[in-house]
Amino acid sequence: MYYGLGVWFQLDMPSFPGDAAVGVAAFILGYTVARFNALVEGRVIRRDLLYIALIIGSFTVSYLVVAEILYLGGHRFSTLTLILIIVVAVSSLMLYDGLRSTLDRLFYREQFRELRANLRALAREAGVGQTLPDRLQAILSALCRTMRIRRGFVALREDDLFVCRASENAQPVGQAYALPILEVDEIVDLPRPGASSPEGMSLLVPIYADDDQIGALVLGVKEVMAPYSEEDLMLLDDLADQLAFVIQTMRLQEDNAQRISEMVSDFRDREHALQHEVQQMLAERREEALPLLAGVGEKQFVSLVEDALRRLHDYSYLGEHNLAQLQVIALSVEGREEGFVTHLDRGRALSEVLVQALNKLRPEREDPDRCEVPSREWYPFLVLHDAYVEGKLNRDIMSWLYISEGTFNRTRR
């Protein structure tokens, strides 16, 4: 617009605002193309964005070189020049797929190039958005409009029935017919002698795939009430072959898309399971790498844990506790608190870590009823949880679990 106004009014305008506007426009155009491409193909790949930046940059440099050559040659820019630049820019973007395929040969091995090409082709086929009934409806509407037929419908064979899947002023979609009603070997007039036929229809065209009838095209009378000629019957016979091809192709695409979707879903499930196993292995390695406190033996460590559990809700005390110096506590505090870390933060982190460790003893089933004695697998978790987290008296826990004091002490230890 800036250059257009300058050319139109023949004004001597500074070039910097126009150059900046062209740069901004080129950036917005390139970003829009990249975002649209990622949206269409359902992916965001950093290398593809690098391709786009490389292509847009190459075009920009080429335009600048050509413009400089024209300027040095004394060419005066006009409205026609701007139009040509826009046309060339838009045309250049159409070369994106070809250039990307060329660059794929440089960055990807052959098997990955084929995989990317197949996935893009499948995305384009799946992105058409037209289902088989939609395609049949479009063909039927065009046929009735061209041959001036008042009504008609297309029925597809599904198990032991013919089901209407496209209709033009005729039977509703979804209506079913028994096989003898629409099953014929060749084009026949309706109604058939001695056989039931769809009401108000005058012609039945079978749709065959090899030796199996997969559908039927049923048509009513013409608007001028004229009979179907030999040329009409030849045209409809050829159309039936085309319909059979469309039906088989669409069904094959749907089956392939579903099969590939199941394969991709299965692959992603296995990938997530593998990632979980890797993370679990890394976590175990990380736990093994976290050392105990220096100079503290196993018995002393158990005593420290018991002491920390007894003061589980006293963050001030836990913040100065020896266990607060463990690396797992430092990792738990990192990035969670803004500003400096106080002993209260370390105490809260130690309390949470102890509760997390205690919860690992919880059996993977519903919580037991407080009015009944739980099974023995619940004893380790309930003894620790009720004693330290909920602060219940020991005699109350022993009474509920129906255990002696010795069993209670051994289980808690």
Image (tube, rainbow, N blue to C red):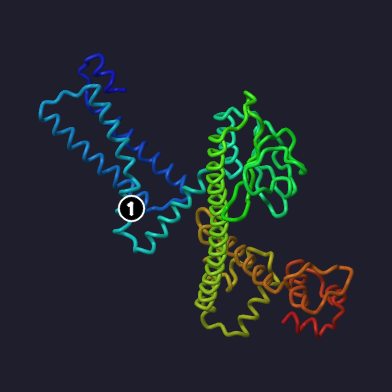
Q: Amino acid at mark 1?
A: Ser
The percent coordinates of residue 331 (x first, y second) are 52, 66
* Pick the front one: 350 or 150: 150
* The N terminus lies in quadrant: top left
Q: Position of residue 79 (x, y in %)?
A: 25, 22
What is the quadrant of residue 398 in the picture? bottom right
- Say left or right for 98 vs 144: left
Q: Quadrant of residue 22?
A: top left
Badge 1 element: helix
Q: Could you tell whether 65 is left or right of 47 in the image?
A: left
**Mark 1 neighbour density, 10 Å: few (under 14) some (14–19) many (20 or more):** few
**Number of marks in the image?**
1
What residue is rendered at 76% in x and 66% in y?
390
Q: Nearer the viewer, residue 119 or 299?
A: 119
Q: Residue at x 33, y 53 (%)?
A: 101
Left or right of 218: which side holds 31? left
Q: Residue furthest left?
A: 73
The spot of residue 364 in percent (x, y) is 72, 71
Dividing the picture into quarters, in which one does residue 166 lie?
Answer: top right
Q: Residue furthest top?
A: 9
Q: Is residue 372 above or below residue 30?
A: below
Q: Which residue is denoted by mark 1 in the rendering?
A: 101
Q: Is 353 above or below relative to 51?
A: below
Q: Is residue 366 above or below residue 291?
A: above
Query: What percent of the width, then of the height, locates residue 300?
Result: 61, 83
Residue in the picture at 89% in, 68% down? 371
Most foreground residue, 58 or 301: 58
Picture quarter with the C terminus: bottom right
Residue at the (53%, 35%) spot, across then down: 231
